[in-house]
Amino acid sequence: MQDAPAPERVSLRVIAHDFAYVSVRLPGVSLSGIQAKRDGMGRVRLVFPVTTGRDGQEYPLMALQPGTLEAVTRAVTAAWAEASRPSQGVH
């Protein structure tokens, strides 16, 4: 069994303390427009964009294999923690 590909780059645009937009670069593909939602315990959940079919049903525009999803979620969690730290400005 192959290991899940590690994200090459994670870009995070924090909108609120519990909401951000994420772009992820995986080997061979860039994914953008992913919503990241953080709960009160600090756990991050990724929500992928959807499209509405002719039947009114919503379908995700993208999906990740479970191992890849876990790796991306870990990378987003780490990036969000880094972005949430107070900056160490020059005095």
Image: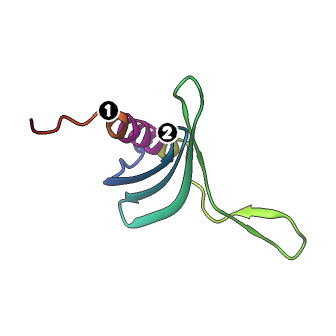
Q: Which residue is drawn at 24% across and 37% down?
A: 87
Write the start and end of the magenta stretch as one range. 70-81
Q: Work out whether mark 2 precedes mark 1 in sequence or the reverse, and give the earlier one.
A: 2
Vertical arrangement, residue 11 with respect to residue 81, above or below? below
Residue found farthest to the left: 91
- The span from disc 2 to disc 1 (Cα, nearest Å) is 23 Å
Q: Which residue is drawn at 29% across and 33% down?
A: 86
Decide whether the magenta segment is chiefly helix, strand or loop: helix
Q: What residue type is labelled 1?
A: Arg
Q: Is residue 76 magenta?
A: yes
Q: Which residue is drawn at 34% across and 40% down?
A: 83
**Which residue carries the number 2 mark?**
70
* Percent of width and height locating residue 19: 55, 45
Residue found farthest to the front: 91
Q: Which amino acid does label 2 sit on?
A: Glu
| Numbered mark located on residue 85 in the image | 1
